[in-house]
Amino acid sequence: MATGLLVSDHPLLNDLYCFNLRTFVDVHLRVVSTFDEALRFIDEGSQGDIIITLSQIEEQDAGLRVFEALEDSKAATPLIVIGERSKISNTNKAYTLPPNLNVPLVVKKVASILGVTAQDMMKVDVPEFYPIPLSIMQAFSESPCSVYVKVSKSSDSNDYVKLCEKGANFAGKVQAYKEKGSVNLYIPADQRLTVTSLASRMVVDALDDPEIDNQARIRVIEQGYDIVGGLLGESQEVTPEVVQISKKCMEEVTNIVKEVPRVKNLLLSILENKTGYLYLHSVMGTYVARHIIKEISWGSEEHAEKLSFVFFFHDMFLAPIFSKYPQFQFEEDLVFKEELTEKDKEIVINHARLASEMVKTFPRCPMGSDAIILQHHGMTNGMGFTLDYKDDISPLAKVLIISECFVEELIRRKGMPNEPKLDEIILSLREKFTKHTYKKIIDCLETISF
Ligand SMILES: [Fe+2]
Ligand SMILES: [Fe+2]
C-alpha cells in the first residue's frame, strides 16, 4: 500500500479521488483543505509517496506553494497539479492534469508514477445507470448502494466513475457537493426501486418529526417532490406510496407558505437551500396564487386548496427531465435545447397533458384540478406552450399562469445588480397579458407583501 496527500477543498473531487485511487492503485490519500495543514505534513516529511493538489485554492496558487514547500524540505515527492491556474502548471516542475472529474486519467497517471501496471488494476463491469437527484441522496447518511458520478458532459457517453460503495459515510456530503456546483449522482438501475422506497420512508418520517425546523423542512419536501417525480416518470401510476408522500408534502408546503410573511423571504430561504427550479417555482407559485385567491372577489379557501394541489403536480413530469439535464433552468427553455433527446422533448411538450391524466387517478383529486393542470401553459389540449393567452381557459388556470409568471420574473431578476421591484414585475406582467380577465388577476398582486 502506498500513501499520499491530496490538497483540495473540493468535496466531491476528494471523495472520488480517494475512493478510486484506493480501489485501483491501492494508494491511501490523506486529504487536507488548507495550506497550513499541507505545509505541516510536508515539513514533517509525512506527505507519503505522492502529492496531488488543485492548482488554486481560495484564489491562491496552491501548486506553487506546495512545490516551494517540497523544495524547502528537499523532498523529491512527485507532484500532480490539477488545473492550469498555477505558475507551475504545464512546467517540468509537476505533472499537470485537466481540471475536470476525469478520474480514470488521474488513476492512470498515479499508477504510472508509482509503477503500478495495468494488470494490477482491477477491471470492473459497469452496470446500467439511473440518475438520482442530489436532494434524494441527501436523505441518506449512509450510501444505500454503490453510487456513481458521470464524468462526461455528452448525453450518450457512458463515462461513469464510482464514487463510493454501499454503506459509505454520506452524512452532510451531498449538501457540500451541491454547494460546489451541482452534479447528478447515479445508481445502478436495478437498485432504483429499493433506494426510492427507502428514501420515501425517510421523508415521511422526517416530516412527522415536530422538532424539524423550516429550513430542513424545505429540503425534506424537495426530496419528497423529487421522489414523486421519479416514481411517476417511471410508471405514471399513482401508487399508495405516491399518494402518501404527495399528501404529506402538500400539507407541509401549505404550512410553510402560511407562515412566511413576505414573498422575498420565501424566495431567499428556498434559494439558500439551493433547491431546483421546479420545486422552487412550485412552492413560490403556491404562495402567490394563495394571495391572489385571498384578494379576488370570487376566491374561496376551496380554490386555494385546489391551487396548492395543482401547483404540486402541474410540472411533476418535468422532474426527471430537470434531474437529467441539471444545467437548464426554465421550463419553456427546455423545448429548444439540442441536448434533449426526442423522447424527452416529447415529455416536455406533453407534460401538462400527462400530469392532468395522472391526477385524475389520484384519490379524492379536487374537482377540476385536472383541467387547470391541462391548461397551465395556456393550451386547452395540454400540448405545447402558448404566447397568446386566451380567454377560453378556466379562471383558476389563469391564476396559476399569472402566479407562475410572477415567480419567473422574480427569479430572473434575482441576482441582477438592482433588487427586483414589485412595480416592475407587475408592469411586465401587464405587457404580457393584455386580456381583461387576466388584468383583474394581476391587479390582486399590487397588495402582495414583497
Ligand atoms: Fe410550471
Ligand atoms: Fe409546466
Image (cartoon, rainbow, N blue to C red):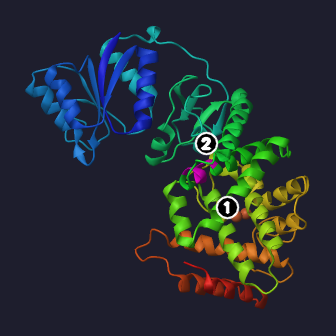
Residue 122 is situated, as x and y percent measured from the top left of the image, at 51, 12
User: Is the C-beta separation of discs 1 and 2 under 8 Å?
Assistant: no
> Which residue is found at the position 67% from the left and 65% from the top?
332
Q: Work out which quarter of the rendered image holds the C terminus and state it.
A: bottom right
* Residue 58 sits inside the magenta stretch: no
Rendering quarter of residue 19? top left
Residue at x 15%, y 21% (from the top left corner): 44
Q: Nearer the viewer, mark 1 or mark 2?
A: 1
Residue 340 seen in this snapshot: no
**336 to 410, vertically: above or below:** above
| Residue type marked 1 | Asn
Measuring from the top left, give residue 45's x and y in whole percent: 16, 19
Please indicate whether residue 102 sits to the left or right of residue 439 in the image: left
Q: Position of residue 224 (x, y in %)?
A: 68, 47
Q: Which residue is mark 2?
A: 155
Q: Secondary structure at mark 1?
A: helix
Task: Look at the image and tell me whether residue 254 can be seen.
Answer: yes
Across and down, in percent, residue 271 comes to 51, 59
Residue furthest bottom in the image: 436
- Structural distance between the alpha carbons of marks 1 and 2: 39 Å
Q: Identify the image quadrant of the N terminus.
A: top left
Q: Is residue 217 magenta?
A: yes
For ligand 2, tell me if the residue under mark 2 lies within 8 Å: no
The span shown in magenta is 216-220
Q: What residue sits right under mark 1 in the picture?
A: 255
- Of helix, strand and loop, which mostly describes the magenta segment? helix
Q: Amino acid at mark 2?
A: Ser
Task: Please tell me how crowded label 1 is: few (under 14), some (14-19), or many (20+) other residues with Cα within 10 Å.
Answer: few
